[in-house]
Every structure is written in C-alpha cells, then in structure tokens.
Image (cartoon, rainbow, N blue to C red):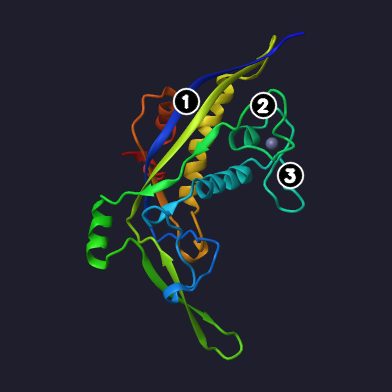
Amino acid sequence: MAEMRIRLEKQVQITGKMICVTGLTIGTGDVFGIGGIDKEMIRTGRDNQPYIPGSSLKGKMRHLFELMHDENPVAADGTPHSCKDVKCAICRIFGAGDSENSVPGRGPTRLIVRDAYLETDSAVATEYKRRTGQYVEVKAENVINRLDGQATPRRFERVPKGMEFRFDLVYRWFTITNGEETYCGEPEAKADINGILDALLYVQRDYLGASGSRGYGKVKFLLKPTNDEMVNAWLEAKINPDIGLDWE
Ligand SMILES: [Zn+2]
C-alpha cells in the first residue's frame, strides 16, 4: 500500500501596495454611534489606525473567484462553496468547511492573506493627518423617507481616496502524492497562482468593503517586483493599460 506524501515546495509571496481609488469602508460589525458616527471603519487595537482585515480581502477574492468558476452549484442557504472533490481549486486555494477539510490528498489551504496595514508614510496619509489629525474621513449620506420625503442623515467613516495599504499574500505550493498518483503538483500550483492573481484583478474591477454600488471601495493593486517565475509569467501575460495591476 502506497503512502501519502506531502512536501512544501515553495512559499510564493505576492505583496505590494493597495491604493484606495475611492473612499473605502470596512465596518466593525457594531454600530456604536460614537461621536455621531453611524458606521465606523475597523481599526487596529494597538494604534487605532484603519486597516484591511485579511479575512475581508480573502473573502472578497474567494467570492469573486467562486462566481468566475460557476461549475460548482451555489449552496441552497447561500453559504460559501465547499466540496469533497480532491481537485477542486476553490477548496484547495481558499479552504473548505470543516467536514471537507479532511479530504485525503487535498492538503492544507494554500492561500494566506494577512491583514493589510495603512502606509502612514505615504504623501496622501501624511498630508491628510497633518490637515485633520487622523486617517479617516466622515461622509454624510441621506436616506430619504419614501412617504414624507424627509431626509435622514447618516454618517459613515471611511478611508479617504489615495490612502495606501500594504498587502501580503502567501501561496503555499505543496506537492502531494500517493504512490503513482499525484493529487497536486506543478500544474496545480501554476493554475492556483494564476487564479489568485486573477482574483486580485476581479477585486480591482469590483470593490472592497461596503457600499460598492454607491461608489465606495474601488482599489488598485501594485505588485512588488518578485523573482518568482510563476508570478512573473502571469504579469507578462496579463498586464496592459486596461487592467492597471502593475509593478510598484
Ligand atoms: Zn470545492
């Protein structure tokens, strides 16, 4: 009986800057109403600065990736995709529910998305802080009552246009074999890295955070130059002025 073998071939880093092309907000999930703010931007506990949780970026990448790979049906209750197919790219890259995580041969979730922190040294951040004393703006929006036409103002906190965050992704390239059978090798790693970079483009064309249909959350990713040949092959194949994802 053959043995399952798993080897970590490479940790592929995909890092760079994410620029807010429009204002961006990611809520805390709680509405405190502090200082008359109806929706606050999420902040770090340590220095109280706005940041992008890894779960927010990863969740958006995954959602759009799932939509672009619609060969898998959406769950009736709307929960994220999860399956037992050992070759499923969605579950391999982004992870699956607990019961499916034990699929032999699939191996660990490949993509790590770290929290993205604000680039406080950028020209925009420095100038904004100097002018206002903080890194967020408050935007008032009106909800109009459909019966009496009265406007009810609500105040949203958001990161202003031009702010930059440092994003940091890691793809863990595993080779997984069982005797003669290879569950995952170089072709899968290459396809996964292409899929991850494609997912960043999908986010760039869609939006990140809340209120995207009202103009929030347009972002642009600038990749830090790398010597990884799979990342470079994707960049050479995909980069053009329409896409925008580009070297730093
Ligand atoms: Zn799956």
Tell me what residue is drawn at x 47 percent, y 41 percent: 114
Q: Does the residue labelled 2 lie within 8 Å of ligand 1?
A: no
Q: Nearer the viewer, mark 3 or mark 2?
A: 2
Report the image quarter containing ligand 1.
top right
Tell me what residue is drawn at x 49 percent, y 68 percent: 39
- Which residue in the structure is indicated by mark 1? 11
Name which residue type carries label 2.
Answer: Arg
Label 3 sits on a secondary structure element that is loop
Q: Where does the image place residue 37, in percent across and percent down from the top left?
A: 45, 73
Name which residue type carries label 1.
Answer: Gln
Q: Is residue 240 in sight in this rendering? A: no
- Which residue in the structure is indicated by mark 2? 106
Label 2 sits on a secondary structure element that is loop
How busy is the neighbourhood of tag 3: few (under 14 within 10 Å), some, or many (20 plus)?
few
Q: Where does the image place residue 76, in percent across and percent down from the top left?
A: 77, 52
Of the pair 35 and 207, the residue shown nearer to us:
35
Name which residue type carries label 3.
Answer: Pro
Tell me what residue is drawn at x 43 percent, y 29 percent: 231
Q: Is residue 119 in sight in this rendering? A: yes
Q: Where does the image place residue 108, in percent across and percent down from the top left?
A: 61, 29
The answer to whether 222 is drawn above or below residue 86 in the figure is below
Label 1 sits on a secondary structure element that is strand
Image quadrant assignment for residue 135: bottom left
Quick one: quadrant of the C terminus? top left
- Which residue in the structure is indicated by mark 3? 73
How busy is the neighbourhood of tag 1: few (under 14 within 10 Å), some, or many (20 plus)?
some
Of the pair 50 and 228, the residue shown nearer to us:
50
In the image, taking residue 106 as reference, residue 159 lies left or right, namely left
